[in-house]
């Protein structure tokens, strides 16, 4: 048993030893594995540190690029963006279109040549009439002309009597002067001249009464005609009443003349009595006679001068009466019992002033006609328009016409210029046949419109509206800049020139102020007479305010500067 126990003990020892060996082996394996794992951990840590450095470097580089971009963006953000152009060699082209209205160039008035009645009106307003065409037919009152001749005869006889009386007064005054100068005048020798003067006034009064009777007869005859026409509705009641008042006025005049006749008879009696009384007096002294004679001589001389003027006036009245008689007699010879008023030129009826059945007086307006084929178009242009000149041609257009016209007159006013354009007529034909003289060098020259006209000028009517276009192109070439590129300050006109220079971020564009002298201009461009001798970019448009020396962005940079 002891052996068995010894064997069992040896066996347990061997197993313990083997367990110890396996434990040691396990410990060794564990140690090796731990060493290997630690080495892997160290290698992983080193690799992680390298990756972190790369990430940080990348982030730093990205931030650097972003900062550079943001710096450039911030630098250029507030810079104005401009569009540039260059001066060019070219011509000015001035053009202005305004509205205008056609008017008659000339009109003709037609009048009656004697008193009468309208028997027929052969045209109406707006009609086109030709030279010699009948317009109105009239019936003249021959009785009226004969009555006028009678009145002229009465006036002539009265005028002759006045002339005779003046001659009598002149002879008497001369005789009195001779008597005074020869000192043969005596106070008791009184002339009957004053009596003859009163008698002459009585004769004149009788003629005036006769003339009043003639006037009353004529007016009463006219009243009968007016009453007949009034009953037919041809005249108003006011005209009939006016005729009655005229008759009453003539009766009053006649009554006044009759009263005057009584006064003249009394005057004649008094004159005769005074002469008789004067002859009965002979108590004046010689001194008084001398004084009276001197004064009387002066009065006689003044009377002679006055009577001479009266005589000349009466002679003129006689000539006037002769002319009136001649006119009336020619009227009788020329117009039997009718007359036709005809157009004297091709024209259009503007207005008619008479109607059928209307009674008209001598010299009364019948019709107004406008000359066809020639019209004036009045229009207004701006006061600063200085390229339109008399003799220029222009284009007039509306929906029906496109016609060339000629400027005939320019009238400046306070705010505009009034332009008169002639269309049609001889003046335009002559202008079309003769080309205009070339303008002086350096001045604007007229560029003629084409000859393509549509519409006949004879179809135009007064009051028709047109669009009138005036256009001129300069004969020479100039340095031009757009009007929008010009600026002005207290020193004059200038342009902003775009320049290039080195900046903190590379090439940059900036502005320089260039002062210039300007000349004429049109709606687009202005002539530069001095200040620009090159063709470099200048600012035309900008989205913000710009100043000299300011940095800008150029919208069309590629047109002027290479990348």
Image (cartoon, grey):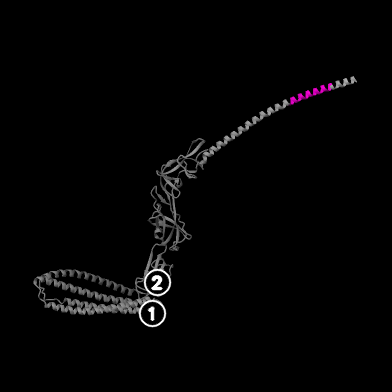
Residue 525, how many percent across, how many down? 44, 47
Q: Nearer the viewer, mark 2 or mark 1?
A: 1
Type of secondary structure dominating the magenta stretch:
helix
Residue 340, how many percent across, how many down? 38, 72
Q: Which mark is residue 354?
A: 2
Residue 192, how many percent across, how many down? 15, 77
- Give, as a single range, the part of the protein colored magenta: 13-33
Which residue occupies 36% across, 79% down?
225
Question: Closer to the camera, 320 or 15?
Answer: 15
Q: Residues within 10 Å of mark 2 (few under 14, many from 20)?
A: some
Classify 115 as above or below 545: below
For the residue labelled by badge 1, is the local secondary structure a helix, a strand or a loop?
A: helix
For the residue labelled by badge 2, is the local secondary structure a helix, a strand or a loop?
A: loop
Q: Which mark is residue 228?
A: 1
Which residue occupies 22% across, 70% down?
310
Name the image quarter holding the N terminus.
top right
Q: Is residue 454 left or right of residue 245?
A: right
Disc 2 from disc 1: Cα separation: 20 Å
Classify 8 as above or below 210: above
Which residue occupies 61% across, 32% down?
56
- Judged from this view, the residue extending furthest toward the left is 286
Question: Closer to the camera, 348 or 363?
Answer: 363
Q: Does residue 381 belong to the magenta stretch?
A: no
Residue 463, how many percent across, how many down? 43, 63
Question: Closer to the camera, 320 or 450?
Answer: 320
In the figure, residue 52 lies in which quadrant? top right
């Amino acid at each position: 048993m002891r052996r068995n126990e010894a064997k069992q003990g040896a066996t347990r020892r061997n197993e313990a030893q083997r367990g110890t060996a396996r434990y040691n082996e396990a410990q060794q394996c564990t140690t090796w594995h731990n060493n290997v794992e630690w080495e892997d951990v160290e290698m992983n840590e080193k690799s992680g540190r390298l990756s972190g450095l790369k990430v940080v470097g990348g982030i730093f580089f990205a931030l650097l690029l972003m900062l550079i971009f943001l710096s450039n963006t911030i630098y250029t953000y507030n810079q104005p963006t401009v569009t540039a152009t260059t001066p060019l060699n070219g011509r000015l082209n001035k053009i202005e279109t305004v509205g205008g209205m056609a008017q008659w160039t000339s009109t003709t008035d037609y009048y009656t040549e004697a008193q009468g009645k309208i028997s027929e009106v052969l045209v109406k307003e707006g009609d086109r009439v030709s030279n010699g065409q009948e317009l109105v037919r009239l019936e003249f009152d021959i009785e009226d002309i004969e009555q006028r001749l009678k009145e002229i005869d009465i006036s002539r006889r009265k005028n002759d009597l006045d002339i005779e009386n003046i001659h009598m007064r002149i002879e008497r005054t001369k005789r009195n002067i001779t008597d005074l100068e020869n000192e043969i005048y005596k106070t008791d020798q009184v002339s009957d001249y004053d009596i003859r003067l009163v008698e002459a006034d009585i004769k004149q009064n009788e003629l005036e009464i006769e003339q009043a009777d003639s006037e009353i007869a004529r007016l009463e005859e006219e009243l009968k005609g007016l009453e007949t026409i009034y009953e037919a509705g041809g005249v108003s009641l006011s005209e009939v009443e006016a005729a009655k008042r005229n008759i009453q006025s003539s009766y009053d005049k006649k009554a006044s003349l009759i009263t005057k006749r009584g006064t003249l008879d009394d005057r004649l009696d008094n004159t005769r009595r005074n002469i008789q009384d004067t002859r009965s007096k002979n108590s004046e002294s010689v001194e008084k006679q001398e004084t009276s004679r001197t004064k009387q001589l002066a009065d006689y001389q003044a009377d002679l001068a006055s009577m001479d003027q009266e005589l000349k006036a009466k002679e003129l009245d006689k000539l006037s009466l002769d002319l009136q008689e001649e006119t009336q007699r020619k009227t009788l010879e020329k117009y039997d019992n009718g007359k036709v008023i005809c157009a004297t030129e091709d024209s259009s009826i503007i207005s008619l002033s008479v109607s059928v059945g209307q009674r008209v007086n001598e010299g009364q307006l019948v019709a107004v006609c406008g000359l066809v084929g020639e019209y004036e178009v009045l229009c207004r242009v701006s006061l600063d328009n200085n390229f339109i000149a008399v003799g220029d041609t222009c284009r007039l257009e509306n929906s029906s016409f496109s016609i060339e016209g000629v400027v005939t007159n320019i009238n400046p006013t306070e705010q505009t210029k009034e332009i008169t354009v002639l269309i049609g007529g001889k003046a335009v034909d002559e202008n079309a046949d003769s080309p205009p003289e070339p303008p002086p060098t350096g001045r604007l020259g007229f560029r003629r419109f084409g000859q393509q006209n549509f519409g006949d000028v004879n179809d135009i009517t007064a009051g028709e509206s047109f669009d009138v276009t005036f256009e001129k192109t300069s004969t020479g070439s100039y340095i031009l800049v757009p009007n929008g590129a010009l600026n002005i300050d207290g020193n004059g006109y200038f342009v902003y020139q775009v320049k290039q220079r080195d900046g903190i971020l590379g090439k940059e564009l900036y502005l320089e102020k260039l002062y210039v002298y300007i000349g004429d201009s049109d709606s687009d461009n202005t002539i530069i007479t001095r200040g620009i001798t090159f063709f470099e970019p200048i600012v035309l448009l900008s989205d913000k305010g710009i100043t000299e020396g300011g940095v800008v962005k150029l919208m069309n940079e590629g047109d002027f500067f290479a990348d």
